[in-house]
Structures are given as C-alpha cells and as structure tokens.
Image (tube, helix red, strand yellow):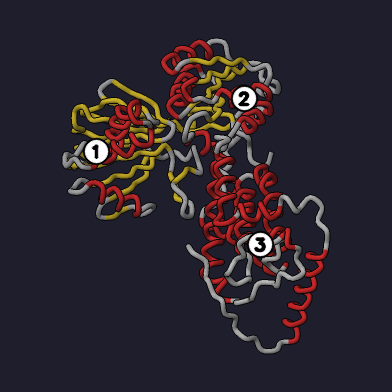
C-alpha cells in the first residue's frame, strides 16, 4: 500500500503542554544532530535506505526461514504478518491523523542526509513501526531469533533520527505502534507457547541423561542429517542409524531388538512406521521432527533436538492415543489423520507429478486434475443409507481452529475420532471450500462433523483410496476406524519443567 502523500500541514492552535513537548522534541533532535556518532556515518544511512518498503525485513525473514526449523519458519511468518499490519495502520490512519512536517535539515551534517528525502508527513515513523513490528513478532515466536533481530531493528529506528528525517517522538510512537501490531497479531493467531497441551499423567520411562540405550533411526530422504547430529551432541551415547526410505521399516525392527528407547527422525509417514514398531515391541518412542509438516511432533510439543534431549534426559513422557483402520483383513495405524475420497486421490496424483515438476507445482496440478472430475470418489453406507461423498476425514483427536490459525490438536489423548464429512454433489471445489470455511461448525449444507470413539462404514467403493499420515492404500467393502486409547508412550518435555 502506498503511503499517504500530503504536502500541506494543518495550522495548529495554541496548546501549552503540547507546545512544550514539541519544543523538547525539537531540542532533542538538534542535540542528536550536533553529536558526533562514532562509526555511524558509513552504516546508519545505508541501513535506513535498506529498510525502504520493507526490503530489509523480507530478506531477514528469508534468512530466518532458511534455518529450516519449524519455530524459525513460524517466527519469520509472524514477523512479516506483524510488519504488514503495522504498515497498513501507519499508512491509512497514522499519517492521516497527525500531519506533522518533517524536521528542518539545517543542523544535520550533509554527509548524514539521505539522497532522496521522504515526502510523507512525519508522525509517526513508518520505518520504526516496521522495525519494531518485525522484531517483536519474531521474538514472540522465537526469543532466540528475536535477540538476533533486535539490534538491527533498534539501529533502523535510530537511523531515522540520525539522518534527520524524523523527530525522536516520531520514532518512539512508530515503535510503540509496531510492537502493538505484533501483539495484535498474536491475539488473532496465538503463539505455540500460549497453547500448552493439557497435562497428561506422567508415565514411567527410562531417563537417559547421556542417551545410552536410545537408538535413533533417521530417514535420509528427509534431509535432516544436521538435526540428528545436533541431537547426538546433546546425547552423545545415543546410537544413530541412517538409512534410505526403503530400508526404514527393516532398520526400525533391528533397532527395536536392542533399544531401551526407539527413536525416529523423519516426516509423519516415517514416524507412523516407528510407532507401529514401538507398539509391537512395547517400547517408548522418541520423535525428532524431520519432515516438512511434522504434525504429530509439533502437536506433541517437540519442536527440535533441544526439546527431545531434555525429555529423554529427564525421563519425561506421556501416553497418547493411536487411531486404527481395518478393511477386509488389512489394518494400519494413524497418529494424525485418516481420510477417504478426494484427498487420497490428490495425494496419489501429486506423487505421480512430483518427480517431473517438483512438490509444490505437483500439488497444484493434482488439485486441478482431481477437482475437475464429476465422479464421486467415495460411496459409503452410514446408518443404513448410501451416501456419495467427496471427503471423509477422521482425526486422531479433536482438531481445533485457534484464532485465524489452521486447525491443530491440543490433546493427543482425548479418546475420540474427529470425523468430518463433505457431502456429495456438483462442484467439489466449492463444496470443499465451503466445508473449510464452516470450520468448527458441526453441520452445514456441505459439511457435517461428529466426534466418536469408533466409526464403521459399509458399502465402501471397491478400490477406494485411503490416506493415513501421508501414506495411501486401497480399501473397500467394510471399513472400520477406531481408537486405541493411550496406547503409545512418547517422550515430550512436561510443562513447567
């Protein structure tokens, strides 16, 4: 959004207190202009220019996100969202409300002055607002990255006085508005530390301060070798087994035969396989997120190697539910979700396109191809009546929408399947969109939702696809979805420790 451009300044009436504050502000500006700022001359003007139009902060967000940790990606996104809200507020309300002229440049040495002077009104400082909004947003999600960004943000705000384009009060007001924007964003989309999962009864598990007895199987296909080796730095006596995706199940079986604790690093599909092995061998599971989305690990409360090493070292764990599907003698487990209909077909199509065009373009092509079909991918009998369906989704635990954020689970042991259905009909894309917008509503013309401990479907189309934790299989006839309450023991740092 372009800033408000206004060359005119409204004439102010006399007001004693305001006039004193403005006079003090002017004296502070002149005091700063007369001072010699060691080493600032080659740095601050360039830094001030680099923050024009948010360029500096977009680059900083890209650098933070490049660290590839979920917390860093969330911090970068929150910083940009806060910056966007601050810029929108400043340029639509702030600049229009107080039409204050820019400072005169007479006391500012020529070497400090910007080559292109801003022509907007002075109060409040948009650069200071953007800097404070980005830094505060990042810090609310990741204090560590916040400490890295804060000195840069402070320097950008300071540079606006140094170069003579703002009075000190403009910068202070802008910074306050920017920080307020970051807290407003947190009100709409809470940070994860404000959404602590409900406490579960503590489960007795081995405490392994140096990691001895932990066998960690890492899927090389996830590309997270640095994360696994960082865990070994914290738990030096843990054993690491790195393997190709096709060898993951076999290596997990071997590891389970000699481990006190079975560890796994990979995406949700790899974690699903490890959970199956851990259940069969009655072993506690240690999960290090190593995939793209890592739904189970993040909902559990394990974000990185520090979280996992702390839980393993102290012997902190909880018991969580596991979902199970059964169809014509076949069965499988799911830790996150299980679905039939459009989504499994989309996954199958996407996997076919991915080797040729890459993951994200493949997802777009798959969606266009699947949603153009008029054939319903799923027919099932529910309550003795046949229904054409576009989608049946079952979550292992209740999925909540938090503010404007996508759904997530706050309790992994609530004993229920969160079942959502998108009814059949014309135009699947519109029906799926309507169901998504319905969100937490239990019933709409396109969508229905129910929470149950067990769901039995009959008359399911032969060869229908079922997706579970990113894997796809074929089912048909009778399909049963059920819960295994508190079946799996998983390490996670306990709240307040």
Assess disc 1: are there few (<14), some (14-19) or many (≥20) residues with their C-alpha within 10 Å of its C-alpha.
many
Residue drawn at (28%, 55%) of the image: 444
Question: What's the CA distance linking mark 2 and mark 1?
Answer: 46 Å
Q: Which mark is residue 370?
A: 1
SS for tag 1?
A: helix
Residue drawn at (44%, 50%) of the image: 401
Q: Position of residue 59 (x, y in %)?
A: 56, 45
Q: Is residue 175 above or below residue 72?
A: below
Q: Is residue 82 above or below residue 466?
A: below
Specify the quadrant of the image occupied by residue 241. top right
Specify the quadrant of the image occupied by residue 379. top left
Foreground residue among 212 and 23: 23
Mark 3 vs mark 2: give the one in front. Answer: 3
Q: Position of residue 460 (x, y in %)?
A: 21, 33
Q: Position of residue 283 (x, y in %)?
A: 54, 20
Horizontal side, residue 456 vs residue 200: left or right: left
Question: What's the CA distance linking mark 3 and mark 2?
Answer: 48 Å
Horizontal side, residue 249 vs residue 187: left or right: left
In the picture of the structure, the residue carrying the numbered disc 3 is 175
């Amino acid at each position: 959004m372009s800033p408000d451009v206004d060359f005119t300044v409204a004439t102010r009436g006399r007001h004693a207190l305001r006039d004193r504050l403005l006079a003090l502000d002017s004296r502070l500006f002149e005091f700063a202009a007369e001072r010699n700022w060691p080493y600032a001359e080659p740095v601050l003007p360039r830094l001030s220019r680099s923050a024009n139009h948010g360029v500096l902060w977009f680059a900083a967000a890209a650098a933070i996100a490049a660290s590839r940790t979920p917390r860093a990606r969330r911090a970068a996104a929150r910083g940009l969202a806060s910056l966007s809200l601050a810029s929108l507020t400043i340029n639509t309300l702030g600049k229009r409300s107080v039409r204050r002229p820019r400072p005169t440049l007479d006391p500012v040495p020529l070497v400090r002055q910007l080559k292109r002077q801003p022509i907007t009104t002075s109060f409040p400082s948009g650069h200071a607002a953007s800097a404070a909004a980005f830094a505060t947003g990042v810090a609310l999600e990741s204090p560590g990255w916040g400490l890295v960004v804060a000195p840069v943000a402070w320097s950008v705000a300071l540079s606006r006085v140094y170069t003579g384009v703002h009075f000190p009060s403009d910068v202070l007001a802008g910074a306050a508005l920017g920080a307020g924007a970051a807290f407003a964003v947190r009100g709409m989309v809470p940070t994860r530390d404000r959404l602590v999962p409900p406490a579960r009864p503590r489960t007795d598990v081995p405490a392994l301060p140096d990691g001895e007895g932990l066998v960690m199987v890492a899927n090389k296909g996830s590309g997270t070798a640095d994360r696994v080796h960082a865990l070994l730095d914290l738990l030096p006596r843990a054993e690491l087994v790195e393997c190709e995706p096709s060898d993951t199940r076999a290596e997990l079986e071997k590891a389970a035969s000699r481990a006190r604790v079975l560890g796994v690093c990979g995406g949700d599909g790899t974690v699903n396989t490890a959970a199956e092995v851990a259940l069969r061998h009655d072993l506690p599971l240690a999960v290090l997120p190593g995939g793209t989305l890592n739904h189970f690990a993040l909902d559990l409360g394990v974000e990185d190697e520090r979280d996992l090493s702390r839980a393993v070292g102290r012997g902190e764990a909880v018991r969580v539910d596991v979902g199970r599907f059964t169809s014509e003698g076949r069965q499988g487990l799911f830790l996150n979700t299980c679905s039939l209909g459009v989504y499994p077909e989309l996954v199958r199509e996407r996997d076919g396109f991915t080797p040729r065009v890459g993951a994200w373009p493949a997802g777009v092509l798959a969606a266009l191809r699947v949603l153009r079909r008029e054939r319903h991918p799923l027919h099932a009998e529910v309550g003795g009546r046949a229904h054409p369906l576009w989608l049946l989704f079952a979550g292992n635990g209740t999925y909540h929408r938090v503010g404007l954020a996508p759904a997530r689970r706050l309790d992994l042991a609530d004993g229920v399947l969160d079942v959502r259905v998108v009814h059949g009909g014309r135009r699947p894309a519109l029906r799926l969109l309507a169901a998504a917008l319905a969100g937490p509503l239990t019933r709409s013309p396109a969508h229905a939702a129910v929470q149950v401990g067990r769901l039995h479907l009959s008359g399911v189309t032969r060869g229908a696809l079922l997706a579970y934790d990113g894997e796809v299989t074929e089912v048909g006839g009778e399909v049963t979805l059920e819960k295994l309450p508190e079946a799996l023991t998983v390490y996670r740092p306990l709240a307040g420790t």
